[in-house]
Image: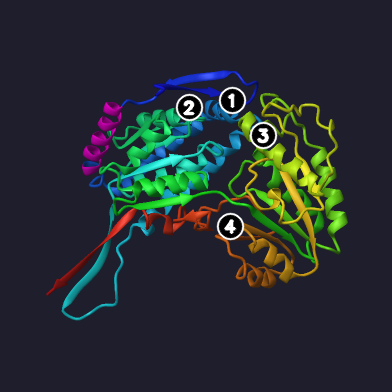
């Protein structure tokens, strides 16, 4: 059994850094410290908790260049784009702190003579956050901020691809002056992580990752009656209606498909276009895709970098090859992007047409820079195809008719319906999914519900 791990940077396939895994004794010490610290933290005034969390956010923003560099070197996102993740972190963190009083407020039923009745929200105890690499700050902050604001202690176990992010979070909360043990991070392998999930000191688990990982986490927690929030990815569709603003749809859907090299949970992975716009949409989509500056993500002019690792790129290459063998046509010619290099993490974006749902690229999560585009004849056909998936995270409708967007959205099995935008989380709205995308809610005022328990007070006068 390995006692350490190495991070391979997608920039050139070299070892970026190495870290030791926490030992069983170190993990137990973290659990004990979290439980001990939470007893005092829960009784700290909400205003003070918010102030300390806000100081940690301030620290991350003051060190955004370090944070951005860590993102780029660990996962390959262009350095021109990585700082944007810190802006998103600030938006979500500030919003969740601003609504903390609302999210944690007592619930008052209708008055009843002779009785005082109310319900209070209490912290669960210790919350375990299992965060992924693709948006390493954003995905973690979704749970960390409301969990801490609610009076829980937090243990962060980040992806083994992004240990620097866990360490930066730790530095931020330490610098902010949180009491020792309230926020801690651990580097663990998969087996040790599942043992941590099952530990009796853990009161809630928030996991973002693969479906297989979600099953493993849920099974590890199944012997105890604790909550588990699971966000397990998607195969998010877009539908361009006959009345769409075509130029806007093209511009935003190219970005929605290829930003972060397609490695976004809610990135666009399949597009359905009304037949009246189909050829014009495809032509515009291909033209804009060809304009990407694909290459070394440390180059400030680059706006599309490598995937996170060579094996991920290999999977997407195989999806493309299988689709083409089944009749699909690839519209980005080989060699258009010089940086494309089989056997490495550098995979150029690809646009496929003549695709159908018998192909993996239209059915299975790609999580890479490839998109399949199909023509449809009606709203009904588009909705049927959008629902033909085991996933349900977001769906995007491109139309000038908001009433139609609501009507169609009500028929789509998904957690979020967008109109004329995609690949975005609004912290005022619940982030949730259905089917194999998982269950649970983060963000919005509802995000506080799964991180607290209700206690009823029934007082007779």
Q: Residue furthest bottom?
A: 113
Q: Which residue is mark 1?
A: 73
Task: Tell me which segment is drawn in magenta.
Answer: 24-39
Report whether 355 appears left or right of 343: right
Q: Nearer the viewer, mark 2 or mark 3?
A: 3
Q: Residue at x 84, y 30 (%)?
A: 335
> 62 and 325: which one is in front?
325
- Label placed on residue 313: 3
Q: Earlier in the sequence, mark 1 or mark 2?
A: 1
- Residue 55: image x %, image y %? 40, 36
Q: Residue at x 42, y 51 (%)?
A: 229
Report whether 96 appears left or right of 321: left
Labels 1 & 2 near each other (Cβ < 8 A): yes
> Could you tell me how far apart the alpha carbons at marks 2 and 3 are, in whole angstroms?
23 Å
> Could you tell me how far apart the alpha carbons at marks 4 and 2 are, in whole angstroms?
33 Å
> Could you tell me how far apart the alpha carbons at marks 4 and 3 are, in whole angstroms?
23 Å
Using the rendered view, name the quadrant where residue 414 is placed: bottom right
- Label placed on residue 164: 2
- Label placed on residue 390: 4
Q: Earlier in the sequence, mark 4 or mark 1?
A: 1
Q: Secondary structure at mark 2?
A: helix
Q: Residue at x 62, y 70 (%)?
A: 411
Q: Earlier in the sequence, mark 3 or mark 1?
A: 1
Q: Nearer the viewer, mark 4 or mark 2?
A: 4
């Amino acid at each position: 059994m390995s006692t350490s791990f190495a991070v391979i940077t997608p920039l050139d396939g070299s070892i970026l850094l190495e870290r030791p895994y926490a030992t069983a004794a170190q993990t137990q010490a973290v659990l004990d410290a979290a439980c001990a610290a939470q007893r005092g933290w829960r009784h700290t005034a909400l205003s003070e908790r918010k102030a300390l969390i806000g100081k940690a956010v301030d620290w991350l923003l003051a060190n955004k260049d370090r944070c951005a560099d860590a993102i780029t070197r660990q996962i390959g996102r262009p350095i021109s784009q990585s700082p944007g993740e810190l802006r998103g972190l600030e938006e979500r963190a500030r919003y969740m702190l601003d609504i903390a009083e609302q999210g944690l407020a007592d619930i008052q039923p209708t008055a009843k003579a002779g009785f005082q009745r109310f319900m209070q929200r209490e912290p669960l105890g210790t919350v375990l956050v299992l965060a992924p690499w693709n948006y390493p700050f954003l995905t973690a902050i979704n749970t960390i901020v409301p969990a801490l604001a609610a009076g829980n202690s937090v243990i962060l176990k980040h992806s083994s691809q992004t240990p620097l992010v866990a360490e930066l979070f730790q530095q931020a909360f330490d610098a902010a002056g949180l009491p020792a043990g309230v926020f801690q991070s651990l580097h663990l392998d998969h087996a040790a992580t599942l043992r941590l999930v099952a530990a009796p000191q853990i009161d809630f688990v928030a996991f973002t990752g693969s479906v297989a990982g979600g099953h493993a986490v849920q099974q590890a927690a199944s012997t105890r009656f604790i909550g588990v929030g699971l966000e397990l990815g998607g195969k998010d569709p877009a539908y361009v209606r006959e009345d769409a603003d075509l130029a806007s749809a093209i511009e935003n859907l190219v970005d929605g498909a290829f930003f972060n090299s397609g490695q976004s949970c809610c990135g666009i992975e399949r597009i359905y276009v009304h037949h009246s716009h189909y050829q014009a949409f495809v032509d515009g989509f291909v033209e804009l895709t060809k304009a990407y500056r694909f290459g070394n993500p440390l180059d400030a002019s680059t706006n599309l970098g490598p995937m996170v690792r060579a094996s991920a790129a290999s999977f997407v290459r195989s999806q493309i090859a299988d689709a083409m063998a089944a009749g699909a046509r690839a519209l980005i010619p080989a060699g258009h992007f010089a940086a494309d290099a089989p056997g490495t993490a550098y995979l150029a974006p690809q646009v496929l047409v003549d695709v159908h749902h018998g192909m993996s690229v239209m059915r299975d999560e790609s999580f890479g820079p490839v998109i399949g585009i199909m023509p449809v004849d009606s709203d009904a056909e588009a909705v049927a195809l959008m629902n033909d998936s085991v996933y349900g995270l977001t769906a995007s409708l491109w139309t000038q008719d908001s009433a139609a967007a609501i009507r169609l959205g009500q028929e789509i099995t998904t957690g979020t319906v967008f109109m004329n935008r995609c690949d975005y989380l609004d912290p005022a709205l619940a982030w949730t999914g259905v089917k194999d995308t998982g269950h649970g809610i983060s963000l919005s005022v509802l995000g506080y519900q799964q991180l607290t328990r209700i206690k009823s007070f029934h007082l007779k006068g």
